Image (cartoon, coloured by chain):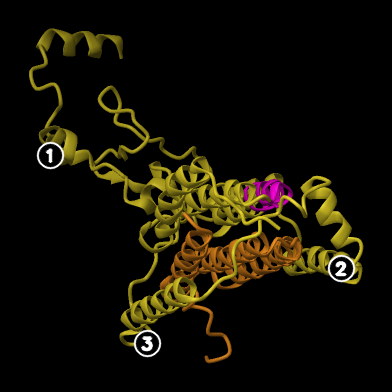
Amino acid sequence: MSPLEISTGEAVLFWVLAPLMVAGALSLLFAKRPVHIAVSMAGVMIGLAIMYIMLEAPFLGVAQIVVYTGAVMMLFLFVIMLAGVDSSESLVETIKGQRWIAVVGMLGLLVLVIAVVTRATLPPAVGLAEANADTNPVGVARLIFGDYIFAFELTAALLITAAVGALVLSHRRRLSPKIGQKELAEAKLAAYGKGGSAEGVTPPAGPGVYARHNSADMPALDAAGIPIDSSVVTVLRVRGQEAEAADLDSDRVARIATGEPMVPEIAPATETTKENEE
Amino acid sequence: MSLVNYLVLSGILFSIGSIAVLTRRNAIVAFMGVELMLNAANLTLVTFGRLHGDLHGQVIAFFVMVVAAAEVVIGLAIIVSIFRTRGSASIDDANLLKS
């Protein structure tokens, strides 16, 4: 068996990919929003897939893209949208100093792994040219359906169990009768009839200050000039991206709040015409 | 360049994944750390497979991938059901056995 020679192209590709992958993985530690982390992790998975192909494992590279980038990371994105998109992380340490102990432990692990790998005496690299003689998927299939056939059959049992388990875990039994649109409207009207709030009966205020700022992050002002928080979309409020009316138009807001008329000089003539109309 | 570079990269990725599991409080992010550790192990398997001129490493990496996919499905279902009952995806809030 002739020893493996690694081409310059592979080395260049490695040195381009590796920093990108490490940077993407570091987002796990430093990025704040789970969505950013999930997308950069998908990037790391693509980098790994390219590395598998570089390492003469094209079947595994394609499987990596299909399974990890396509299925797993997108499942993560689904769950983030379902559960954690607005979850801010608490910075309180439940175990004192846990973060620093973890950092020290990680550095120790890193040094240990790198030292072992670099100082170990490895045999000369062989390469897979011989094993991949009938193309890589054929070689892998010979092993999977030969030596590993029992493990492969067990995999089928594992996958069906996982699918059923996910269905059972995410199934929610209905404890109360289903409340549809009709029932909800009737309940709201009944509550309003008994002197409850008009919320849900009258349409809610939309965002924006009429004729001034109608962007979605600007809360509407009520008759007293007080911003109505519920007029801004929940996501913007949770993220703290809601604008303050006072930021953009402070003197106008102050004037509304004091009850000063917005059009100070009203000609008497227009007032009389208004009276006439009435 | 030798194949050792791949092993070093895999060690770096594994360490980053492990510290993410240890320090991040969001259950979903911690879970992504587990995924990164699994992938780093896969990279090692494939690299050693090439080093020894043997396809067994790739086959084992393939099985790791299958098991990881099943594990992700179950883990995320657990996170979703905890989020439904407790209203939070933080791993510090899941103290039902303590209280």
Predominant SS along the magenta part: helix
Residue A260 in view (yes/no): yes
From the image, tell me which residue sits under label 3.
A95
What percent of the width, then of the height, locates residue B94?
Answer: 53, 79
Q: Say the numbered circle drawn on residue A254.
A: 1
* Marks 2, 3 in one chain: yes
Q: Nearer the viewer, residue A17 or A93?
A: A17
A271 vs A202: above or below: above
Identify residue type, mark 2. Answer: Tyr
Identify residue type, mark 1. Answer: Ala
Q: How much space separates mark 2 and mark 3, taking CA atoms?
A: 44 Å
Q: Residue at x 11, y 16 (%)?
A: A266
State which region is magenta. A57-71
Quarter assignment of residue A274: top left
Position of residue A243 in the picture relative to residue A190 (left or right): left
What percent of the width, then of the height, locates residue A221?
Answer: 28, 38
Tell whether position A141 is magenta.
Answer: no
From the image, tell me which residue sits under label 2.
A148
Residue A256 in view (yes/no): no
Q: Residue at x 53, y 92 (%)?
A: B98
